[in-house]
């Protein structure tokens, strides 16, 4: 979290001391005020990144103080956290109604205040350096708008009319579009219509600015999906507040959608993991194979310097790499002897079956590609697609090494498992033909860190 300058407002000296100590321990700079009137004076003299305020105070209560902050163009951009002993549902609702960005009960301050500060500051970081495409034919309004938005930390790109905006929008990739209505060539109304009818910009926040004479069109555009309407002449400070509010709301929706997808993915992966257990229960010889391959794959990923997100995706792909075998006939999968050519072709289809299982699941594209490519070979002679070299996904190359090593060292109905030394020699002999040299090198680096009895 960035070093923040936070104003704490509370008429209780003990509460001020406790909150100040909590924030200072988190390396956050603090200024205190003993009531809201002092808080107003502090805001007039100094720049703050965040205000934390109590509610029940003399002279001016915290809710009215929050309302004052949010209605003042010079302070409206500052996030406010209400920290109060009043924590019924109605109290919390009242806090959000006056514009609070978060509401924390005092009894939960030690546990929840710092996470709420981090969340609010993340929102502030998110809105900075965002790009706004301003579509306006008046050079004067262009310059005034550009100056005000850039002073607030936004990147601004100008377009002279709707057609100009359409010509450059793909290169600009704006986070918000601010457009006038009355312009030559393509006007703001037509620009909005075209963008709303595209998959790429269907959810782009669009702010329309125009005169009072366009009220009927304003209502229609809002119904059609315009995020906000600003009446000319407008205050640039309030324009900035509008942009920050839209981006903050957009950020919150992104977080909520991400949490929803993560929850759905966990449920899905849990279900598929159950299928893996069912699969391995069919054959005592391969029981625990997916878990062992996953451990090896993670170790290789660590040697390659993977970050947490990549490690997580690799773990999922490795744990599901054999899920396609659930569609292989028992008389082939469990056959104790050598497979016929037709039987081998049938067992190869498990890399295609896995695609049919995972393809309908959102957010699993990289896992699907990785898990279905672990039988590709570095020299291009593998299956299912005969991929060669670095055309094989990196996760697939990693799983290939882990899969072969564990398969070689495990017992099968028709043979005993190899010793670790022999299996390592097979991997070494296959470098450059079967296995990716970089992945194999990482594998051997990991092996050197182990004792012999921990190789499998």
Image (cartoon, rainbow, N blue to C red):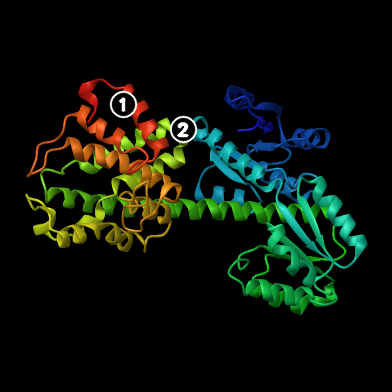
Query: Which badge, 1 or 2, is on the more N-terminal residue?
Result: 2
Q: Secondary structure at mark 2?
A: loop
Height in image: 332 above or below 182?
above
Query: How far is the residue under mark 1 from the one under mark 2?
Result: 16 Å
Which residue: 8% across, 58% down? 331
Q: Quadrant of the C terminus?
A: top left
- The residue tagged 2 is 305
- On screen, residue 344 versus residue 109, left or right, reads left
Which residue: 29% across, 45% down? 319
* Residue 73 visible in rendering: no
> Can you tell which quarter of the image residue 180 is in?
bottom right
Comparing marks 1 and 2, which lies closer to the viewer? 1
Return the x and y of residue 1 as percentages of the image width and height.
60, 33
> Can you tell which quarter of the image residue 341 is in?
bottom left
Say which of 110 and 156 sits in front.
156
Return the x and y of residue 452 as percentages of the image width and height.
22, 22
Q: Residue furthest right?
A: 140
- The residue tagged 1 is 447
Say which of 293 and 387 sits in front.
387
Return the x and y of residue 220 as percentages of the image width and height.
69, 77
- On screen, residue 190 versus residue 310, left or right, reads right
Q: Secondary structure at mark 1?
A: helix
> Can you tell which quarter of the image residue 204 is in?
bottom right
* Residue 304 visible in rendering: yes
Cβ–Cβ under 8 Å for marks 1 and 2: no
Which residue: 79% across, 68% down? 164
Sort mark 2 into few (<14), some (14-19) or many (20+) by Cα contacts within 10 Å.
Answer: few
- On screen, residue 102 versus residue 376, left or right, reads right
Which residue: 21% across, 42% down? 289
């Amino acid at each position: 979290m960035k070093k923040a300058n936070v104003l704490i407002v509370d008429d209780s000296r003990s509460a001020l001391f406790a909150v100040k100590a909590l924030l200072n321990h988190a390396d956050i700079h603090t200024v205190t005020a003993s009531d809201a009137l002092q808080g107003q004076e502090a805001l007039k003299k100094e720049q703050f990144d965040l205000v934390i305020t109590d509610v029940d105070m003399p002279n001016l209560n915290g809710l009215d103080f929050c309302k004052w902050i949010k209605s003042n163009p010079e302070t409206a951009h500052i996030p406010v956290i209400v920290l109060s002993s009043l924590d019924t549902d109605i109290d919390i609702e009242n806090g959000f109604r006056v514009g609070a960005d978060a509401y924390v009960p005092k009894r939960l301050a030690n546990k929840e205040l710092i996470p709420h500060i981090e969340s609010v500051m993340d929102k502030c970081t998110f809105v900075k350096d965002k790009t706004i495409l301003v579509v306006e034919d008046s050079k004067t309004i262009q310059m005034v708008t550009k100056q005000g938005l850039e002073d607030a930390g936004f990147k601004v790109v100008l377009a002279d009319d709707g057609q100009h905006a359409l010509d450059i929008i793909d290169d600009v990739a704006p986070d918000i579009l601010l457009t006038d209505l009355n312009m030559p060539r393509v006007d703001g109304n037509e620009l909005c219509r075209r963008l709303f009818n595209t998959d790429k910009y269907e959810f782009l926040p669009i702010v329309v600015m125009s005169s009072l004479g366009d009220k009927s069109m304003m209502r229609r555009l809002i119904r059609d999906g315009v995020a906000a309407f600003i009446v000319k002449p407008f205050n640039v400070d309030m324009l900035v507040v509008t942009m920050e509010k839209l981006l903050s709301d957009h950020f919150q929706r992104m977080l909520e959608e991400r949490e929803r997808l993560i929850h759905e993915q966990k449920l899905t992966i849990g279900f598929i993991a159950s299928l893996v257990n069912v699969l391995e229960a069919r054959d005592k010889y391969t029981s625990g194979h997916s878990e062992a391959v996953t451990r090896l794959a993670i170790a290789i990923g660590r040697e390659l310097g993977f970050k947490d997100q990549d490690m997580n995706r690799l773990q999922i792909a490795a744990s599901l790499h054999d899920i396609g075998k659930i569609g292989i006939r028992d008389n082939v999968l469990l056959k104790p002897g050598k497979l016929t050519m037709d039987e081998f072709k049938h067992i190869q289809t498990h890399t295609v079956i896995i695609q049919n299982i995972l393809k309908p699941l959102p957010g699993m594209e990289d896992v699907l590609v990785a898990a279905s490519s672990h039988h590709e070979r570095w020299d291009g002679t593998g299956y299912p697609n005969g991929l060669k070299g670095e055309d094989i996904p990196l996760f697939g190359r990693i799983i290939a090494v882990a899969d072969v090593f564990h398969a070689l060292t495990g017992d099968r109905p028709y043979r005993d498992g190899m010793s670790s030394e022999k299996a390592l020699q097979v991997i070494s002999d296959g470098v450059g033909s079967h296995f990716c040299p970089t992945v194999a090198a990482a594998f051997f680096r990991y092996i050197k860190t182990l004792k012999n009895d921990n190789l499998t």
